[in-house]
Amino acid sequence: MLDSATYEVVEADQSATGHALAVVVLANIGLGLGWIGLDADRVSAVVALTLVAIAGWITWALLTYVIGTQFFAESQTRTNTGELLRVLGFAAAPGVVGVLGLVPGLGPMVTAGIFLWLLATMVVAVKHALDFTSTLRAFTVCVTGWAVFVTMFWVLGIFFAPRVS
């Protein structure tokens, strides 16, 4: 998923948003199963995490839009949230490999590798969706967005997470 041409096609294809959603769902099921396992009790957790991942995908696209167009835009930057939803959805594809985390002893290595791969695919996706000439600028948008995203979920967790006594 590091092929630039793929992201250009997905960015332009308005009918691909549903496919991007499917990629997000499959990728998060793969990651969830790899992290949590196959026990019946845990499968419902994978479903819940997948729903959270869909909300995260939408939030990530909105954050990337704001950060990329308001703070790091280049003169040729033209995009919309639909384009970002599509390219970021397809960029989530490496998560499917997360199911390999079910193999004993591979979990941490698989997870680390997938997160690096996801960072690379997100940078390529953002570079193309925002029409950047600089990969470093796309990387900066991704890292900035990630920091804001994590902070948002941390703050939400403080206010809405169940209290542990």
Image (cartoon, rainbow, N blue to C red):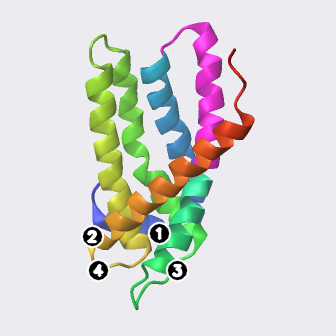
Residue range of the region highlighted in magenta in the rendering: 37-56
Residue 55 lies left or right of residue 60; in this view the side is right
Count of number-bearing discs = 4
Residue at 38% x, 16% y is 102
Q: Furthest-front residue in view? A: 165
**Amino acid residing under circle 1:** Glu
Disc 3/disc 1 C-alpha distance (Å): 20 Å
Identity of the residue drawn at 72% across and 39% down: 159
Please say whether residue 1 is visible from this viewpoint: no
Mark 4–mark 3 Cα distance, whole angstroms, equals 17 Å
In the image, residue 5 lies at what x, y percent? Answer: 31, 67
Picture layout, residue 156 above or below residue 4: above
35 and 24: which one is in front? Answer: 35
| Residue named by callout 4 | 133
If you read the primary sequence from the N terminus, does the residue marked by circle 2 or circle 3 appear first? Answer: 3
Earlier residue among tags 3 and 1: 1
Query: Against 136, is 18 above or below?
Result: above
Q: Which residue is mark 1?
A: 11
The residue tagged 2 is: 135
Q: Residue furthest bottom?
A: 75
* Residue plotted at (66% across, 29% down): 48
